[in-house]
Image (spheres, grey):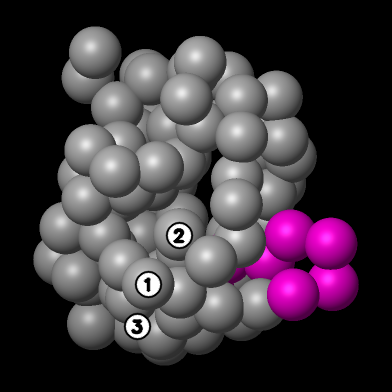
Amino acid sequence: MYTQEVTVNNEVGLHARPATYFIQKANEFKCGIWVEKDERRVNAKSLLGVLSLGIVGGTTITLIADGSDEKEAVEALTELINGNFGE
């Protein structure tokens, strides 16, 4: 299991378009991936799950992955978030 905390710094947080990019990236990996915020954990490959967390700009989340490519998955998702989802 591999975990990392990351702060979402874009203005809108993880909503609509950024969440879609996040889900698409998460689905490129075989391992199980979760997003945790305030003791709630959801599947990072589920758009409704991620949106249900209500992640706004400035929120720190924890990415958790478990499987053969767990480290690569967390690093790729962290890079996507830190790059403001390519915007």
Q: Which residue corresponds to mark 1?
A: 48
Residue 30 position within the rendered picture, expressed as x and y whole percent measured from the top left: 23, 82
Residue at x 29% of width, y 43% of height: 16
Q: Quadrant of residue 69?
A: bottom left
Do the CB atoms of the residues marked 1 and 3 lie less than 8 Å apart?
no
Q: Nearer the viewer, mark 3 or mark 2?
A: 2
Most foreground residue, 66 or 15: 15
Image disc number at residue 31: 3
Determine whether 11 is above or below 41 in the image.
above
Determine whether 65 is above or below 82 in the image.
below
Do the CB atoms of the residues marked 2 and 1 lie less than 8 Å apart?
yes
Residue at x 49% of width, y 18% of height: 10
Quarter containing the N terminus: bottom right
Disc 3, SS? loop
* Residue type at the position of mark 1: Leu
Say if the magenta span includes residue 65.
no
Q: Give neighbour class at mark 3: few <14, some 14-19, many 20+ (Cα, 10 Å).
A: some
* Residue type at the position of mark 3: Cys
Residue 71 in view, yes or no: no
Do the CB atoms of the residues marked 3 and 2 lie less than 8 Å apart?
no
Residue 42 position within the rendered picture, expressed as x and y whole percent measured from the top left: 55, 78
* Residue type at the position of mark 2: Leu
Q: Which residue corresponds to mark 2?
A: 51
